[in-house]
Amino acid sequence: MKIVYIGTCYPMRGGLAQFNAILARELRQRHEVTFLSFRRQYPDFLFPGKTQYVTEPEAASGVRFDAEPILDSINPWSWFRTARRAAAEKPDLVIYKYWMPFFAPAFGTISRRMKRLSKARILFVCDNVIPHERRPFDLPLTRFALAPVDAFVTMSASVRDDLLRIKPNARWKLVPHPIYNIFGEREDKEDARRRLGLAAGPWLLFFGYVREYKGLDLVLRALSTIPRERGVRLLVAGEFYAGEERYRRMVRELGLADRVRFDADYIPEDRVARYFSACDVVVLPYHSATQSGIVQVAYQLDAPVICTAVGGLAEVVHHEVTGFVVPPDDPRAFAAAVLRFYDEGWEARLREGVQREKERYSWTPMVTAIEELAAE
């Protein structure tokens, strides 16, 4: 099968580019894959972080896939060029990774042109259908993007349900988010702490881009209810996409200045394992969610998870097997789960559960689902 994959790829950074490169690499083992990437993903004034591109040395740049930069998210002429370039491959299937309505005009236009220029089927792999942080016109833009699509892969039941509310006749398959397998091996905890300059004692890890819906405020409030003498601390590792000063002020007001450390920058791929190895448990105190790639990073590195019961998180974090699942928006319940984790000695048990559970999250089911949808 000839496949054209359209989306972010190296030298763009982050989980989306990593996911796309891994999936394209897996597909290429059995199919012919051409990757068309962005020349410009966002205008700089709209991008909330410091840079959209990998800035680490060559050896630390992580997984790649040969990609042709052609698409500009805000230049309609590039949408038509992308469609012509994709059609020139005479593909059987065009795959997009879809995650937010900002890209709906480009993706929807390219897909419609592809229908005219080729016999290719269109498939979306959906991170989200309805975005976490909603804006005016999200729904009509999403409908525009989804209308010409022939099939969908969703990675949680909540995303599938959102899809069917907008497109009730959609053809879909649900495949859990596969494990990111690019971050190497788990490191010795004490060595990882020494390399990161962390003191001994209990450490929680909040990892990834900081956005409002991810609930950093909730875990800070939870930490403030845990007695200081318990020594529990929080490492926040990731670039702020919203409210950095607000969270730092919150730390000061809650008296947590000596209990919270901010590594407020993008964590390059060759250092990810160190952060997950240095801490005892990963916290995902989300206010809302579909799924989270952070769970799959944690699983690759044998790290247990404490998360809130929102979206699809409880579909992959199994209570008292790979972590704890607690009610959303309840700092005291979250604090109680943290204390139980330490008081009852759950770390080793949950890590064993992660080691068993992660075998279910290979990339094979994702590739198989795409092949079956294309064949149908």
Image (cartoon, rainbow, N blue to C red):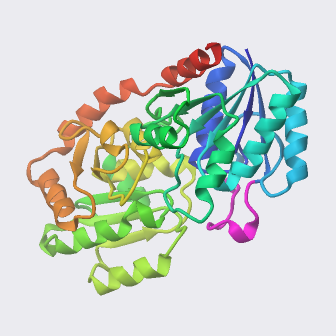
Report if residue 59 is visible in the image: no
Q: Is residue 344 above or below residue 198?
A: above
Quadrant of the image occupied by residue 369:
top right
- Name the dominant secondary structure of the magenta segment: loop
Q: Residue furthest left?
A: 344
Q: Nearer the viewer, residue 135 or 274?
A: 135
Q: Is residue 30 left or right of residue 278?
A: right
Residue 77 % position (x, y): 91, 50
Q: Residue at x 58, y 35 (%)?
A: 125
Q: Residue at x 88, y 48 (%)?
A: 78
- Residue 68 visible in image: yes
Q: Check residue 234 for magenta coloring.
A: no
Range of residues picked out in magenta: 41-57
Vertical placement of residue 232 versus 144, above or below: below
Question: Which residue is at a point 61% across and 23% down the rendered structure image?
Answer: 26
Residue 280 percent coordinates (x, y): 27, 51
Q: Position of residue 34 (x, y in %)?
A: 78, 28
- Give the residue furthest to the front: 168
Looking at the rendering, in which quadrant would you find the N terminus? top right
Magenta stretch containing residue 42, yes or no?
yes
Q: Nearer the viewer, residue 187 or 245?
A: 245
Assign the C terminus to one quadrant of the image: top right
What residue is drawn where x is 84% and y is 46%?
Answer: 79
Position of residue 76 in the picture relative to residue 194 (left or right): right
